[in-house]
Image (cartoon, rainbow, N blue to C red):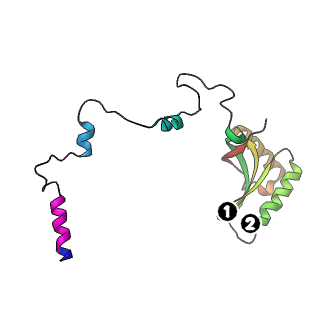
Amino acid sequence: MRALFLPLLMIAASPIAMADSEVITIIDHITKGTSNTVNQPDKLMQRLIPVEGVEEDEEPKEDMARPVNGRMAGYRVQVFSDNNARTAKNEARSKQRVISSRFPQYQTYVMYTSPYWRLKVGDFRTQQEANNAAEELRRAFPSYSKEIRVVRDRVNVHD
């Protein structure tokens, strides 16, 4: 009985069965008329404006263009990356100590993003700065040169 009831319900609810009422599809609704109105909450509009308090025609002020929480998009030099569960962490920390002692001006970061352990060096705003540091590292550590590459990352901003 239940198997018979479901198809009857589907037929009764279909647009063919509703011949009295007009069926309007979303395409008909959107293309009807010459203009469309988009209603959106004010809070959504505030999120779409890149810097709070800046009008569309106005350029952001120097203070407002600063990165939030001292972090911004930038570059780092990746010196090591491995997914060997037994050795990768220790090797990354070992290379970190060696690089930090030779280049104390560069901050080093050992990071784990499953399944990889990575060692990254520096906080560079431009790719050219990162490329220059990568060349310095290649000259100082020729055995690491195959793995040294510049990568995009969120970097800490130093004033």
Q: Which callout, 1 or 2, points at the residue further toward the start of the chain?
A: 2
Please state, as top left, top right, bottom left or bottom right, where the C terminus lies in the image. top right
Q: Is residue 113 left or right of residue 27?
A: right
Residue designated by label 1: 116
Mark 1 and mark 2: span between their CA atoms?
8 Å
| Quadrant location, the N terminus | bottom left
Q: Which residue lies at the image location 27% right of the left edge and 45% below the top edge?
A: 26
- Queried whether the magenta region covers residue 22, the answer comes back as yes
Please tell me which residue is depicted at 18% across the width and 59% down the height of the picture.
Answer: 13
* Residue at numbered disc 2: 88
Q: x, y (%) of residue 152?
A: 65, 46
Farthest residue to the top: give it: 57
In this orientation, which residue lies closer to the viewer: 45 or 137? 45
Using the rendered view, name the quadrant where residue 30 is placed.
top left
What span is colored magenta in the figure?
4-23
The front one of 67 and 135 is 67
Q: Amino acid at mark 1?
A: Tyr
Secondary structure under badge 1?
Answer: strand
* Residue 58 horizontal/vertical position (percent): 57, 22
* Amino acid carrying mark 2 in the image: Ala
Q: Is residue 125 above or below residue 120?
A: above
